[in-house]
Amino acid sequence: MRVRVLLAALLLLGGAAFGRGARAAEGPRTLPATPCGVTIDGDPREAFLLGGAALPAFEATTGDPDGSIRAFLLATPEGLYAALLSTEPPAAGPLRRPAWRAPQDAVLGDWMGLRLEDAAGGGTRVLVLTAGGRSASLGPDGTEARLAAESWAGMDRRFGHTWAGEWLVPWEVVGVAPGQPFRAALLRGRKLEASGSLLEVLSSTASGVSAGRWGAAPALWRRPGGSPAASSLRALAPFDVRPFIPPGEGAPACEDAVPAGEVATAWLELPPSESPRTLEVKGAPEGAELFRVDFWWQAGSREEQDALFPVRVARGAGDLLVAERLLPLAAGDLRAGPLPARIYARMRVPLKQRPGVLTLAVRVLPGTAEIPWRITVVPPLPPSTGLAGIYYMEGDPARWPAALDDMAAHGFTAVTCPAREQAGWERFRSLAKSRGLDGFFALFPDGLTPPSEGAWAYAADEPAGLSEVRAAAERAKQLRQRGFWPWAALCWPPSARLLGELAGVALTPGFPRSPAAPLPPGRTWIYFQGLRENPDYHLRMTAGVSRGEGLQGFWVFCYTPSRPETGDDWESPPWRFDSCKAPDGAGGWLDTVQWESLREGILVRRLLEALEGRGAPTAELAPGLEPSREGRYWVSEGGLTPSLLKSILTTSWARQSS
């Protein structure tokens, strides 16, 4: 049936087949506008960062919604900006790149286009992009339109399984004055034939079944009247990493509250600039670090992301634009750019800092622009009573010191040892101990001699079948005979049979517990996959689930080893959870927003520990965390955000310590 519908659409000829009879009755929608310029380079991040209007996408030959297509329109000072993203299923193979010929001859292969018309539905033009960077403008009959190639800009690019295209059409080419209506739609097709032949259209951003070669009737839009006000320096809520934060949101000052000795953060946004700028933090007792938050693609379909990254949950079909990498600003220098710059600042408050409000300022030079950064400092916390552990598998000893420094700075108390021989085991334990980390958890104990007292050995990782459980039980017995304490990660019901053989266990959240299989007393943790884009997830795991009945902490998978496929490019998802390769090619590494979010969760956990040690019940301090304490970490109650909870807890800690 679908083939017959497609063939019928392909057999319709002439201007009467443009679908004018299906015009929507509603009035025009005003396009969102931005004072910022855009760059046409095939990378459509501007659509997300500047708040482009998201268009619904439809299968052009059936009228059904098409979740594999995402499209955006935006009014800019230069003209109409359009972006189309098409997620390719893995089975489709690479995009077909046709040998380009004149439009009046033929173009065979994948294509995408921006269709423009006047408000009455006349003067159809389609600005076409094909895989490989070719472009042309076609008229209603499929022949080349009288539109000079230099009068509009367009480019395509591939990101994993997403093919993206961008258009920038000057307003005089669109042919509308400020406040006037026009029609526009975006198209995605597989085959384009000119010279009287028809076009195969797969998807369109106009609703309704296609009645002609250019998809369904385009929607009616209005060019905004006047120019929007330019953005200004503003403070943002901590970890608010939405690509587009609308004007009017934000605050005139950055606020944070932390115990002495902990890390305070500031989040802000700077307007675009045509010249370089320098940022500095005035009044920081021991200096501050400044980063530019980098938004980049998390490539792959939802199924691919779930398969490759159980640590990440895609929020819909297709690729995502994720605020991930933190690019250090050396000496505070920020390069010029046409887009707003998202800035992250962090500073460790001195342990000797007296309680009170520490007032700093983030200043932008040249000029006098600055924004206050107020930090409420409360008394320092006692050492953590719970375990905050991290799986670490880095095989290159040269990276151990810096990585262990990073873990300690983020609040971890234990780390698995990746060494496979005795000398490496001893060196790693010494490095970890010097940084206050418990490094007595050997991941690969087979090559190690009998250890000193207190060493742990990994016996199994998520055994599922009965044969795997029996093998893990035998291995646990052998490790005990060698002087180790065996522990394992368990997530499947059959592995409950191992509980009696282990000195410690890390359980996945929701692991089925049974009175017939008691947990090892005092040595039971949860484990979870890091890192999620949503910092609320870290809060609920570190401060909620891991502090449930019978649990003494957590282990997290998020620090991956360096290896050749660990990428820093725009074409594949990065195999980095805690950090990414620096783009300078010098072999450096970058922190990520998610990694910083995990540190915040650990700090909230320590605040709860300290308050409960003073007799304050969690149910009263953080009622929104109760579902997480019960294991229902997917339940969010009371609008409890990490920053709000931290503010509540620091206030309570200051009161308890006075």
Image (cartoon, rainbow, N blue to C red):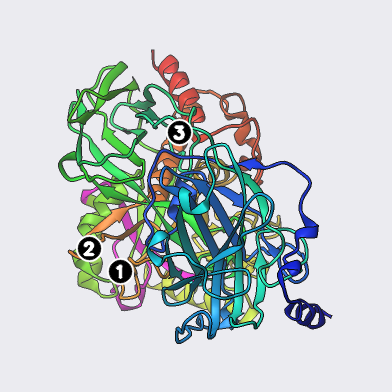
Q: Residue at x 18, y 26 (%)?
A: 285
Magenta range: 434-461
Q: Residue at x 20, y 41 (%)?
A: 276
Upstream in sequence: badge 1 or badge 3: 3
Q: Nearer the viewer, mark 1 or mark 2?
A: 1
Question: What secondary structure is found at the residue carrying circle 1?
Answer: loop
Q: Which residue does the numbered mark 3 point to in the structure image?
A: 227
Q: Is residue 220 visible?
A: yes
Q: Residue at x 49, y 60 (%)?
A: 503
| Badge 2 amino acid | Arg
Within the image, what quadrant is residue 268 found in?
Answer: top left
Q: Give x and y (percent) for residue 556.
A: 45, 55
Q: Which residue does the numbered mark 2 point to in the structure image?
A: 399
Taking depth in this image into account, of 261 and 268 the one nearest to the observer is 268
Q: Does residue 10 show up magenta in the picture?
A: no
In the picture, which quadrant includes the C terminus? top left
- Look at the numbered discs 1 and 2 and tell me whether their residues touch, using CB distance below 8 Å: yes
Q: Which residue does the numbered mark 1 point to in the structure image?
A: 562
Name the side, left or right, on which 278 lies relative to 458: left
Upstream in sequence: badge 1 or badge 2: 2
Residue at the far right in the pictured view: 1
